[in-house]
Image: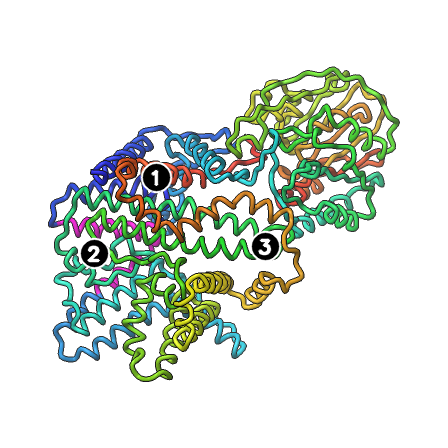
Amino acid sequence: MVFSSVSFLYYFLPITLIFYFLMPQKIKNLVLLIMSLIFYFYGEPRYIIVLIFSCFYNYYFGKLIDKSKNKKAYLIINLITNFGILFYFKYFNFFLENINSIIGTNYSLYIIMPIGISFFTFQATSYIIDIYNGKVKSAKNILTFATYLTLFPQLIAGPIVRYETIEKELQSRKINYELFGQGVRRFIIGLSKKVMIANVLGELSQSLLNIGQTTILSHWLVAISDTLQIYFDFSGYSDMAIGLGLMFGFKFLENFNYPLTARSITDFWRRWHISLSSWFKDYVYIPLGGSKEGNFKRYRNILIVWMITGFWHGASWNFVLWGLYFAVFLIVEKIFLLKILNKHKIIGHIYTIIIVIVSFVIFNRTNFNDIQLFLKNMFGLGNLYFTNIETNYYLKNYIFIILTAIICSISYKKIYTKIKDNKIYNIIEPIIIIILFILCTAYIVDESFNPFLYFRF
Amino acid sequence: MKNKILSILFIIIIFSLSIISIILPDTEISKTERRYLINFPTLNIKTIFNGDFFEQFNTYAVEQFPFRETFIKIKGITANKLFLKQEENGVFIKNGNFFEINSSIDSKSIDYFLELVTKIKNNFSSENIYYSIIPDKNYYTKEEIPKINYNELVKTINQNLQDITYINIFNKLSLDSYYKTDIHWKQEKISEVVKTIALHMNNEPIDIKYSKLTYDNFYGALYGKIPNNEKPDTITYLIDENTINTKVFDYEKNQYYKVYEEQNLKNIDSYDIFLGGAKALLIMENKNSKTDKELVIFRDSFSSSLAPLLLPYYKKITLVDLRYINSDYIINNNLIDFNNNQDILFIYGIPIINNSFTLK
């Protein structure tokens, strides 16, 4: 079930809120667990078994590692199982395809990837590794752990919440209007980002890819709107997760911090999908030796980490390329560029934006030839006109939504800091947020609008 | 305080709308969309575990959402007034004229169309086989909107249908020949098209004095696609002895109709007045006819208003709409008498040619 749907907003959420707030403190976790399982079952009826297995298996291994003397052996068995399952569901088909193309065979299996498996596997392994390192104690009972792992706000698209972040809240948490209202506000902002901006930009990009004659400008517009779309979609989803968390009394960590204001790629990755990059930093980069063992190993580690980070995003070579592309810039920045960029902030910003836009051209195309052709056309090497009637038509139609997206992604924080203590703003804020919610509902309902021209009654 | 207000408002909205949506009876038909809305999905172990129930429930929940049409309007107004987007659901309005935006030719659809026409014409013994292409109204607008490459489209079709005669009607129409809120042409504005087609098919020109009847409340197919305050169109239909004396036989229903079914003006689509709307196979028999000639038209809805004006030239006109009847079925069951005193006309609008997979 996606958050931006009538079934979630007007069926699932009200029912969950009723049960959650009417039930006594003691069984609130149980309510959350049951509702989270229903939430998952709704979108993935069959593979819920994988999620339930992961709950029991990791709970049990958490206990084992906590108490046993042979911690390392259990850790290794656990990690092999968790990543083995992830590999099977997410990468095995890709692996077979590559084997087939190398040795000319024709093996294939029909494997469907369970929704959210990348996220809950990473949450589970962070829990296990943290217990191994003595950072957290294993969960007291299966209910607590299963509630943590399946918590529906972040179950299918993150952020990757670590057990230590919400350990205390899983035992007891405050619920009041203050937190609930903050949660509602955050949720609605996220929802607006998703339905009023990301989806509309997706429409633009689709229309531009379908025009009869593409142009240099249409390629740039596609690349820019794709970048903004991914940002608003993903950060909107994180906002919704954080907001829902607050409504139920959980404080998740921030996952995005205005990444499009970054002034270097190093800076960008401190602001983009923070829960993922910090996972890789803590559980891969640092265990590999991080930056402590000389420059050669440091750069090697960066390459390894970013190759895997790319691959985490999807079972396709373009994601690996996407990760390595960032690794190269990160290394170059570490060698010398970062110092220069820090001195020239505007140049740093422009440089970062262009690199990020190009990165999403790679991200969105699985075929290397398509990537090459697109970039060639984008940079004027493709024998295309600069613009034409179709491109101008779509630019005119979508320019305000693009500008809104740019302003929101770059200057929103500045504007909000200025007005947030203003009295009048504080009075009208709830009204603005509620209007946004009604508009979001209108946008969601409109998606079902599907007129037939030649209908026979 | 502000968080308390926000919390309460939010809770009121989600609970009241969900309760209303449970209480309100389901709507069966959406008139603006011209289609049935989905009913509550089948609930059983199988549909739950294969995910069908949940998938259909998503559609059900949104299609039966309370005040759905109002929300759709709110969205349209927001997009139009706040984000200054002039196009909505692929439709663009300028000076009260609605244009459906399409800028790409689907070459697979064109190939399919050409194959189908070739297959059918090979079954006719008649040598008098013709085809014509009806441009959509975007062809005639001076607005800078995306358009398909009309020349390329016509060229491709001409090159592939060389052994049958092409009747070019592109220069017999103008933007004014089309309804503003609909994709179809106006019957009173196609006399030049009728003359051109009749002449090409070796008919003596006949001048007919038609009397005109009108209906003022025609909300065309494009009207519902974009929120607007534009005026409806007027349907004008042309009457003469031929249209009065011709009986229209509907093969599917096995009964006779009139050329203009005036009660259909009240239908969701008032254009249904012409030959009763979308029909698989119609036979028009003109007892008044001064000739013995027959005509078979393979057609889409544009011909519903065209065919009545061809009556003076033919004794019998057969109209086949391949969206509703399979061409193999017609050929195998000899539903059309093939004879040598027949003209055959394939005439299709570009929207159908470019989306021909609906033809069978």
Q: Give the residue type that dot 2 points to.
A: Thr
Residue A48 in the magenta stretch? The answer is yes
Chain ID for label 1? A
Between discs 3 and 1, the one toward the N terminus: 3
Could you say which disc has been placed on residue A147 in the image? 2
Task: State whether discs 3 and 2 lie on one chain.
Answer: yes
Which residue does the numbered mark 1 point to in the structure image? A437
Residue A236 visible? The answer is yes
Q: Which quadrant of the figure has residue B177?
A: top right
Q: Earlier in the sequence, mark 2 or mark 1?
A: 2
B334 over B228 or under it: above or below:
below
How many tags in the picture?
A: 3
How many angstroms separate mark 2 from mark 1 (CA)? 28 Å
The label nearer to you, 3 versus 2, is 3
Report the residue at 56% width, 47% height from top. Answer: A395
Q: Residue A305: x percent and y percent?
A: 36, 74
Q: Are marks 3 and 1 in contact (CB under 8 Å)?
A: no
Q: Mark 3 falls on what kind of element?
A: helix
Q: Which mark is residue A268?
A: none
Residue B47 or residue B196, whichever sits in front: B196
Say which element carries label 2. Answer: helix
User: In the image, is residue A29 part of the stretch drawn in magenta?
Assistant: yes
Q: Which residues are magenta?
A: A27-56
- Left or right: residue B38 versus residue A370 is left
Q: Is residue A379 left or right of residue B6?
A: right
Q: Is residue B349 visible?
A: no
- Residue picked out by circle 3: A217
